[in-house]
Every structure is written in structure tokens, then in C-alpha cells.
Image (cartoon, grey):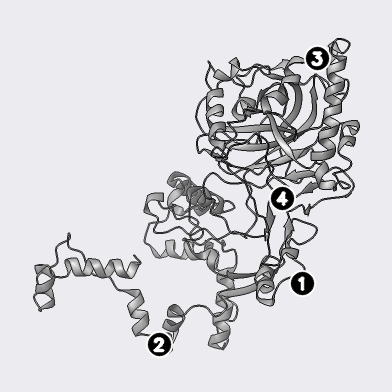
């Protein structure tokens, strides 16, 4: 309730007391101290006495200052080099006007005298000490020692003690030795009252401290009537950001392209809290198998570094790494078997098997190069990366990347240290070497199954240790994201300032899916749509068909020619 409603309610509750009733009827009985006295309702008084009815100085107290409000136009700062809105002509006029609200300059309404209100600038002890800086020390007569004054007067008076006190000679002596005051200029001159008031006002302002109540003690925080923080300029919301760089991915055998993706999951909230980041670390020779199905790659698809935003840091956040391969005939377990059995070192013994695998991979890439199937996965507990409890170990220099001494984590299923809130804004950069991946089970592809696996990875006796791993070598860097990274693309693939050279391999900002609602205004236009097919059940159908590809298209109206192409999903 507002203040006026509270006062009315208190008046109704205590207005019928016998003490107040007797006083209203003309009795001279005093109101007890414990009784509530009805205060003046300022809102009702101002409504009954408008400022036009007042005159003189009271009108200035009742009315607002005419120059209090100030409307200014401030240019909007765009993070990207180009605005992320559709071009003119693509939308109707009403939609175009609505979209322009994300690009037009700000109209800011400011109050000139807002700083004088304690509701917006509360007087705190710290602020009171700052206001008292520069104040001259005030020394009054009562603060000076009395003994020194008596001795000084005796030295200056000379024979004053020899003269009887109260005599005519004493008075003459005081008058002759006293220093006359400086004459007042213009004392007897005729001066207009307005000119005298202006001169006196100027004299009062000389040497005056800007803070009138600087010596007044700061009020107690518990006694504050209200606190109003001035609103900040709307800006795009960012949580704590981390930078993940994918350095290399190697297997024991290499005969087909393998693709990877990264995403953040919160197992406590059981939510996926980021969009997927897809990366390609295949060699040029392996990429040649997909020449018939891939157009010239866009510069955005060559990114190998991503910036993830975390609005609600938690010790239960995992970085999930998924690997995919080109769709091929057979069960997922059969497709993973060569990676768990064959070794590149045993090339002479397994030469014929490797040749058959390469021939089959070429056939599948030529026919089904546009489609993917799940292959393997693993996860990194981010809390373990930040914690000092996990013992790092130096591994030898990498001859391919030339990087010296990176930090190697042998196991990724360590216990998280504590369940307290953690922060990802400032930590020591680390390079992780992931050596084991888990084979993707064909009947466990849903997110619910993934949450169970991630929860099991935190236990000492994890059931995932019993599974046969797929040996690989993936190296990634995890570090705090810089304030203004160079060569960065927004989630809409717009160039973020600064972007000196458009030909350099970029870094992608990954869109966040907050685990809980974030109360922040939308300051930019986002035209993004995410489609995730959850499941497809063919258990009631009979047949030997094992791999099914699903194609998704977005239709604009009923015209098939306006269909928007969407990558095929398995």
C-alpha cells in the first residue's frame, strides 16, 4: 500500500478510541502518549489546495520546480558492427517500427534535483566522511585554555592590576589601549533594499561548504524510510563468461571425419543452459571425403573457440562434449567397435581391415555425407577445473601445436569440492587433455539419460568406469573470457566490436539458456529459433530398417516455395 492508504487504515483503526472521541467533542482531556495521532495527509492536502490557489512563497513549496525534469537523447551503443535487424522492405511497416525500438537512440528523462533526495542518495557513514573532507577545524572560545588567556591579558594590560577595578581610570585605560573595529563601508549611505539583499546573499555564500548538513551524523540504516536506486542505462545481459578453445582431436585410427559439439548442462536444475557449439578439427585430407556435399565453408563455421555465459553459477555445471560421425549402416555399437579394437601402431597386422574401413567410409560419405549419427561423448565438471583439490600433472610438449607443458587431467569423474556457490569470472586458465570417451548407447540418447550419467560421474564408484572407453586425445583450453575479445561473433553471427580483420578465424558467443529467469530488459533484436527433436518411436512397426533420417523445414504460410532450409537431423 502507498503511504496515504496506510495512514487512512491507521486512522480507521484508532480513530474511534474514547480519548480521541472526547477530544473531538470539545473535552479538554489530553491524549495519552500511547495513542496514535493522525498526521497530515499530504496527498489529500495537495489535492484540496492546488498550487494555483496558493500565493507567495508557499506556492514554491507546494509546486515542483519548473526545471526539474530534463529530457535528453543519448546515442545507443551497438556492440556489433552491423545492426541485427532485418533490412527495410522485408517486413511490413508496423513490424518495422517495432523492430526499430532496438536500434533507435535512448530518450532519457532525468531530474536535476534528484541528488538532493535521500531516497536516491542515502546518507551513509562512508558518504558522511567523504562530505566532511575539507571542512576547516572550528575552534571556539570555550575550547581554548583559560589559563593562557589570563596570562596573555596580564602581559598586554601592563599596569591594569595596579588600577582599582571599576574606577574611572580603569575604563580610560581600556579605551585607550583597545583596538578600534574597522569602519563599516557605506553604513550611512542610502542603499536600495534589493541591492543590500543581493550583497548580503553573496557574503553568506563566501567560504560556505557545499554540504550544508555535513556535520550532521549519518542516520541509522534501519531507520531509512525508503531507498531508490537510480536506474542504469539498459544494456545486454551477460553472466560470468568463460572461453573454451578446442585445440586438437586425435584417435588411434583415422579413416573418416569426426565432428564435435560443446554445451553446458546444470544437473541440479536438470536443464541445458547453453546452445551447442559445433567445431571441426578434421585434417584437410579427411575433409576431402565430403567435397560433394559441402559448399565453400563460411568463415563462421571455422570457429574453434567459444564464449559461454553463466548467469547462475553452480557447482553442478558440466561441459558436455559430444562426437558425431557420418551416418552409416549398422548399430552405433558396431560403428564404435573399430575404434576400441584397432590401433594405428598395428598397421601391418590390421592393414586389410583399415583399408576396408576407409573404402566403406568413402562410400558412406559420398551417399550420406549430409547426415550425422551420434558416436561418443564425455563431460568435464567445471567445478573440478576451478578447484585446487584436483592434482594437476604436466604432460610433455605437443609437437603439433608447439605448446609447452600443459595441464593434464587423467580422470574426469572426480568429486566436486563442496556444494557452495562458485564463480567462473576469475580463475587460473587450464588446458585439459581428455583421453577417454564413452560409447554412445543407441537406446540412451535423451537428456534424461544424460543427467543420470552426469550425476553418476560425481560418485567415487562410478558405473561409467566399467564401460569400455574409446581412446582418443582431445585438448581444450578453459579460461576467463576477456572483456572485449577480438574477432568475436554474436549468437546471430554478427561481428562484435572490435573486429579488425574479417578473414581471421573467429570466436563465437554461445547463446545462454538461463536455468532461472533473468530480470533484465531486452536491448537487442534476436530472430533465433531452436528445434530439438526429442524422440521417435517405431517400436510398433515391423521391419529391418535401423537408421532413419528426419528432415525439418520451416514453412512461411502455405507456399512450399517459401520453405526455409534447415539442416537434417537424425
Q: Disc 1 or 2, which lies upstream in sequence?
A: 2
Q: Quadrant of residue 374?
A: top right
Q: Disc 2 or 4, which lies upstream in sequence?
A: 2
Q: CA distance from mark 3 to mark 1?
A: 58 Å
Tell me what residue is drawn at x 66 percent, y 72 percent: 95
Q: Residues within 10 Å of mark 2 (few under 14, many from 20)?
A: some
Task: Give coordinates of residue 338: x percent, y percent.
Answer: 76, 20
Contact, CB < 8 Å: mark 3 with mark 1? Answer: no
Q: List the residue tagged with mark 2.
A: 54
Placement of 481 over or under 216, stated as above or below? above
Q: CA distance from mark 2 to mark 4?
A: 59 Å
Q: Residues within 10 Å of mark 1 (few under 14, many from 20)?
A: few
On screen, residue 402 versus residue 20, left or right, reads right
Q: List the residue tagged with mark 3.
A: 343
Q: CA distance from mark 2 to mark 3?
A: 97 Å
Q: Residues within 10 Å of mark 3 (few under 14, many from 20)?
A: some
Q: List the residue tagged with mark 1.
A: 88
Which is in the foreground here, disc 2 or disc 4?
4
Q: Quadrant of the C terminus?
A: top right
Mark 4 lies on a secondary structure that is loop
Amino acid at each position: 500500500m502507498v503511504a496515504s492508504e496506510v495512514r487512512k487504515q491507521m486512522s480507521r483503526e484508532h480513530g474511534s478510541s474514547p480519548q480521541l472521541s472526547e477530544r473531538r467533542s470539545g473535552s479538554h482531556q489530553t491524549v495519552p502518549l500511547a495513542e496514535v495521532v493522525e498526521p497530515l495527509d499530504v496527498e489529500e492536502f495537495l489535492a484540496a489546495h492546488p498550487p494555483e490557489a496558493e500565493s507567495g512563497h508557499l506556492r514554491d513549496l507546494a509546486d515542483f520546480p519548473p526545471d526539474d525534469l530534463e529530457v535528453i537523447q543519448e546515442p545507443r551503443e551497438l556492440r556489433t558492427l552491423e545492426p541485427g535487424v532485418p533490412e527495410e522492405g522485408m517486413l511490413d511497416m508496423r513490424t518495422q517500427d517495432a523492430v526499430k525500438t532496438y536500434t533507435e537512440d535512448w530518450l532519457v528523462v532525468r531530474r536535476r534535483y534528484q541528488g538532493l533526495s535521500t531516497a536516491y542518495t542515502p546518507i551513509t557513514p562512508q558518504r558522511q566522511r567523504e562530505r566532511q573532507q575539507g571542512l576547516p577545524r572550528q575552534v571556539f572560545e570555550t575550547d581554548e585554555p583559560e589559563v593562557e588567556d589570563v596570562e596573555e591579558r596580564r602581559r598586554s594590560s601592563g599596569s591594569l592590576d595596579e588600577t582599582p577595578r571599576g574606577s574611572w581610570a580603569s575604563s580610560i585605560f581600556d579605551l585607550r589601549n583597545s583596538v578600534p573595529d574597522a569602519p563599516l563601508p557605506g553604513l550611512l549611505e542610502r542603499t536600495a533594499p534589493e541591492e543590500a539583499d543581493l550583497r548580503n546573499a553573496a557574503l553568506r555564500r563566501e567560504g560556505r561548504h557545499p554540504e550544508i548538513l555535513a556535520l550532521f551524523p549519518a542516520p541509522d540504516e534501519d531507520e531509512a524510510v525508503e531507498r531508490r536506486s537510480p536506474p542504469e542505462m539498459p544494456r545486454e545481459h551477460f553472466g560470468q563468461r568463460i572461453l573454451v578453445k578446442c585445440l586438437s582431436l586425435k584417435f588411434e585410427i583415422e579413416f573418416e571425419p569426426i565432428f564435435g559439439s560443446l554445451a553446458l548442462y546444470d544437473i541440479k536444475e536438470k536443464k541445458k543452459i547453453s546452445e551447442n557449439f559445433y567445431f571441426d578439427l578434421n585434417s584437410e585430407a579427411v575433409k576431402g571425403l565430403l567435397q560433394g556435399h559441402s559448399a565453400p565453408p563460411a568463415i563462421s563455421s571455422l570457429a574453434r573457440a567459444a564464449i559461454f555465459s553463466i548467469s547462475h553459477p553452480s557447482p553442478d555445471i558440466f561441459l558436455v562434449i559430444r562426437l558425431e560421425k557420418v551416418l552409416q549402416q549398422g548399430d552405433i555399437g558396431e560403428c564404435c567397435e573399430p575404434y576400441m579394437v584397432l590401433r594405428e601402431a598395428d598397421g601391418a597386422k590390421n592393414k586389410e581391415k583399415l583399408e576396408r574401413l576407409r573404402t566403406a567410409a568413402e562410400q558412406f560419405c559420398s551417399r550420406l555425407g549430409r547426415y550425422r549419427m551420434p558416436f561418443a561423448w564425455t563431460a568435464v565438471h567445471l567445478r573440478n577445473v576451478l578447484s585446487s583439490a584436483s592434482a594437476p600433472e604436466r604432460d610433455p610438449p605437443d609437437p603439433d601445436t608447439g605448446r609447452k607443458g600443459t595441464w593434464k587431467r587423467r580422470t574426469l569423474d572426480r568429486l566436486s569440492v563442496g556444494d557452495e556457490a562458485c564463480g567462473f569470472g576469475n580463475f587460473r586458465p587450464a588446458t585439459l587433455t581428455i583421453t577417454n570417451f564413452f560409447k554412445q548407447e543407441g537406446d540412451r540418447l535423451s537428456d534424461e539419460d544424460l543427467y543420470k550419467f552426469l550425476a553418476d560421474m560425481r560418485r567415487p564408484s562410478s558405473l561409467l568406469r566399467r564401460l569400455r572407453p574409446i581412446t582418443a586425445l582431445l585438448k581444450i583450453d578453459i579460461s576467463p573470457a576477456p572483456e572485449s575479445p577480438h574477432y568475436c561473433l554474436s549468437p546471430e553471427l554478427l561481428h562484435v566490436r572490435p573486429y579488425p580483420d574479417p578473414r581471421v578465424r573467429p570466436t563465437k558467443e554461445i547463446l545462454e539458456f538461463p536455468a532461472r529467469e533473468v530480470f533484465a530488459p531486452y536491448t537487442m533484436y534476436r530472430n533465433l529459433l531452436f528445434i530439438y527433436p526429442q524422440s521417435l518411436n517405431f517400436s510398433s512397426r515391423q521391419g529391418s530398417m535401423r537408421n532413419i533420417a528426419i528432415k525439418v523445414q520451416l514453412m512461411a504460410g502455405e507456399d512450399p516455395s517459401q520453405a526455409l532450409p534447415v539442416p537434417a537431423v537424425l
